[in-house]
Amino acid sequence: MNITTAGEGDDLVVLHGWALHSGVFDGIADALRERFRVHFVDLPGHGHNAHVPLADDIDAVADAVLDAVPGSAHWLGWSLGGTVSLAAALKAPERVRKLVMVASTPRFVTDSGWPHAIAEEMVVKMAADLEADFHRTVQNFLALQVLGDANAQGLLRELREKLFAHGEPARASLANGLRILRNTDLLPRLGELESPLLAIMGSRDRLAPPAAGEALAERVPDGKAVTIPRCAHAPFISHREVFLSLVSDFLG
């Protein structure tokens, strides 16, 4: 696993979302490095770690990241990276001091007891589209992430510029990532979480609605949720200053 580490201070592990890479955090990297020793991780199958297969099981992915990062750190994860971070905190509570989940959820698809997600059919369609047309599917996913954001055009432009900056992700790993999004359900384990948790959500997010963050914070022993107004799925790009202030205040 290739990891980019820079800065001084408490260790902070940072994980990106599906189909992207750690370069998506370039806009906040300097600010984070001023306060933390930051470990920017490309998930298996993505970016500089495209050569490392991504398993289709969330716990296996969490193990791969845990094996590659410091023994005790704060963790910040966006979207799929947030769910991986949550799985890591549940598996190894002594390794995750505080946890920030950004536009993320313990379960990405809806069921009768969890309406705060997307329909399973949407993930199934993405998987079929991925097999038929890889590039268009990923581009469409980026467009979905910015819908409703106050700065949707600029946000989409930045995401598109970043998309393959670390190389193309492995297609088999992207397919496994969609299986993780479809099958992962960490809801039954939330009561076991020992790490303090902050959920940062966007009020206009179509993939991880703000109600998911509120419900998540209510179900863990020490949780807090904050929703950023007029924000979609990537608050660390569209609302950098607000986002950094929330993270700084929480991690102390």
Image: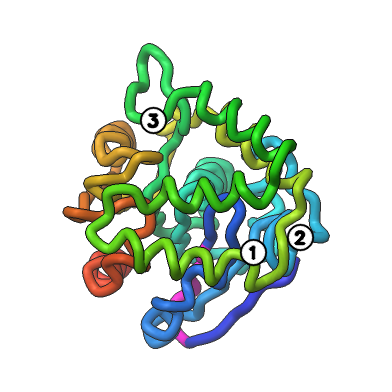
Label 1 and label 3: CA atoms lie apart by 25 Å
Label 2 and label 3: CA atoms lie apart by 28 Å
The residue that disc 3 covers is: 117
Check the picture and name the quadrant holding the N terminus. Answer: bottom right
Tell me, yes or no, whether the two marked residues, 1 and 3, touch with CB atoms within 8 Å: no
Is 13 in the magenta? Answer: yes
The residue that disc 1 covers is: 42
Mark 2 / mark 3, whichever is N-terminal: 2
Q: In this orientation, does residue 109 appear?
A: yes
Tell me, yes or no, whether the two marked residues, 1 and 2, touch with CB atoms within 8 Å: yes
Mark 1 / mark 2, whichever is N-terminal: 1
Mark 1 / mark 3, whichever is N-terminal: 1
88 or 151: which is nearer to us?
Answer: 151
Q: In this orientation, does residue 93 appear?
A: no
Element assignment for label 3 = loop
Residue range (magenta): 8-14
What is the x, y in percent for residue 146? 37, 53
**Amino acid at circle 1:** Asp
**Amino acid at circle 2:** Ala
4 or 207: which is nearer to us?
Answer: 207
Check the picture and name the quadrant holding the C terminus. Answer: bottom left
The residue that disc 2 covers is: 50
